[in-house]
Image: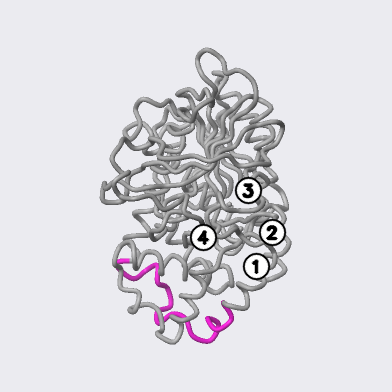
């Protein structure tokens, strides 16, 4: 699972892709400034948790949205991993003009990795609107955009990094909020679109939507270079700079989220470096270079096992957060770069086969000479057009018949 080698990371970063490169579920922004400081907006008293998932706690206007759109930073209620109420933050972008009588369609954007601590929230990013792939097209077409931060980014809690249920619920509740923000005119129909870690989030949204939010109608799932097989991802990437970064962040987060024993897989000499990586955000090339510096000691001391993905409880947790097949009535768009070294093309093809066997209608777009970090950028207009067709009720294309 929206801020290797340094050459590969730098080349892919233009499309907001560090973790997209720096971890097989990552991708970052093309910004050049550090993330803003976290503010009191994100820290609400627990007494305000009372309310339905997807209900609005507070909002504030953000300047700079494209094409005359209005944008709002939002704090809303969602559901934690134990079914407990939690706060989640995000952004809602509303196009100008009057909404149609049946409400505006909603696009849920699921961002790639930006970090794993609260100040790394995309809603704090200087270049937020450039990070949402396809935003201008969505505004032009009259769609509301709901962009969750995920739990623990913005809000003061541990981010359940690459935890599918957590991501999916946050995405769905952002859609609920987008439909109720004053003036949005949002309806009940939506599609979800994500890259890398956000691709995993988009797929889990498809898995959860019908039972978690039966009042909403999910019309399609679009995912660029999604993190599907987490066991393979961790084992394949462990020797690269990006692999070390994603492994460090995953182990650090899951030790706190699942109480998994990190000391059984990480050399104690590596823990100060892992802790430093956990505190760093990724938005700019400067962050990328700094993070490479921070990671350097892991080349000497990091893991005490060859393949942590094969060790329990990590193996079971990775399998738990690997997305399965979606309900067959939900069409799927997959984009995959042919030279992706993080999410290998054969892994995405294998996931497509799983979807096809379950009866899904799948459009697979292979991207020649595209690596992991540029997968969303290179497929944006194809994904936008595919999503537009789903919202218009067109029959979905199906590449499963060609296999």
Residue at 61% x, 47% y: name it: 336
For marks 1 and 4 on the same chain, the one whose residue lies earlier in the sequence: 4
Q: From which residue to which does the magenta span run?
A: 295-313
Q: Which image quadrant is residue 56 in?
A: top left
Secondary-structure class at tag 3: helix
For marks 4 and 2 on the same chain, the one whose residue lies earlier in the sequence: 2
For marks 2 and 1 on the same chain, the one whose residue lies earlier in the sequence: 2
Secondary-structure class at tag 1: helix
Q: Residue 267, position in %: x, y?
A: 41, 84
Q: Quadrant of the C terminus?
A: top right
Calculate the distance from the C-alpha at mark 3 to the C-alpha at mark 2: 15 Å
Instruction: Say the numbered circle drawn on residue 128.
Output: 3
Q: Residue 347, position in %: x, y?
A: 52, 53
Instruction: Say the numbered circle drawn on residue 288.
Output: 1
137 or 76: which is nearer to us?
76
Pointers 1 and 4 in contact (CB under 8 A)? no
Calculate the distance from the C-alpha at mark 1 to the C-alpha at mark 3: 17 Å
Calculate the distance from the C-alpha at mark 4 to the C-alpha at mark 2: 20 Å
Instruction: Say the numbered circle drawn on residue 13.
Output: 2
Residue at 64% x, 73% y: name it: 290
Neighbour tally class for label 2: few under 14, some 14-19, many 20 plus, Cα within 10 Å: many
Q: Residue 140, position in %: x, y?
A: 69, 27
Residue 263, magenta (yes or no): no
């Amino acid at each position: 699972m929206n801020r290797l080698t340094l050459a590969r990371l730098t080349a892919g970063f233009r499309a907001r892709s560090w973790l997209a490169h720096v971890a097989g579920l990552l991708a970052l922004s093309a910004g050049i400034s550090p993330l803003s400081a976290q503010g009191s907006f994100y820290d609400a008293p627990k007494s305000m948790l009372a309310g339905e998932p997807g209900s609005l706690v507070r909002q504030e206007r953000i300047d700079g949205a494209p094409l005359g759109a209005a944008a709002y930073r939002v704090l809303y209620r969602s559901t934690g991993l134990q079914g407990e109420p939690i706060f989640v933050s995000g952004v809602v972008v509303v196009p100008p003009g009057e909404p149609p009588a049946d409400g505006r369609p909603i696009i849920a954007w699921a961002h790639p990795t930006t970090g794993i601590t609260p100040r790394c929230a995309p809603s704090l990013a200087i270049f937020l609107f450039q990070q949402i792939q396809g935003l201008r097209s969505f505004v032009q077409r009259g769609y509301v955009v709901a962009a969750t931060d995920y739990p623990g980014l913005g809000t003061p809690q541990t981010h359940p990094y690459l935890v599918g249920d957590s991501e999916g619920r946050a995405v769905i509740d952002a859609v609920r909020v987008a439909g109720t923000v004053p003036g949005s005119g949002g309806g009940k129909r939506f599609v979800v679109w994500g890259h890398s870690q956000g691709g995993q989030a988009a797929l889990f949204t498809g898995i959860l939507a019908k039972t978690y939010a039966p009042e909403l109608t999910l019309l399609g799932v679009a995912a660029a270079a999604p993190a599907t097989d987490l066991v393979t991802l961790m084992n394949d990437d462990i020797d690269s700079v990006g692999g070390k970064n994603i492994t460090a962040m995953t182990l650090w987060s899951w030790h706190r989220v699942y109480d998994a024993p990190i000391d059984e897989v990480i050399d104690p000499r590596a823990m100060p470096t892992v802790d430093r990586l956990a505190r760093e955000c990724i938005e700019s090339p400067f962050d990328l270079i700094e993070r490479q510096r921070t990671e350097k000691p892991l080349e000497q001391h990091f893991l005490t096992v060859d393949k942590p993905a094969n060790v329990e409880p990590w193996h079971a947790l990775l399998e738990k957060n690997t997305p399965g097949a979606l309900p067959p009535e939900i069409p799927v768009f997959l984009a995959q770069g042919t030279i992706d070294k993080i999410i290998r093309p054969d892994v995405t093809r294998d996931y497509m086969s799983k979807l096809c066997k379950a009866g899904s209608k799948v459009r697979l777009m292979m991207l020649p000479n595209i690596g992991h970090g540029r997968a969303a950028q290179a497929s944006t207009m194809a994904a936008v057009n595919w999503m537009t067709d789903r919202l218009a009720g067109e029959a979905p294309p199906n590449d499963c018949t060609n296999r």
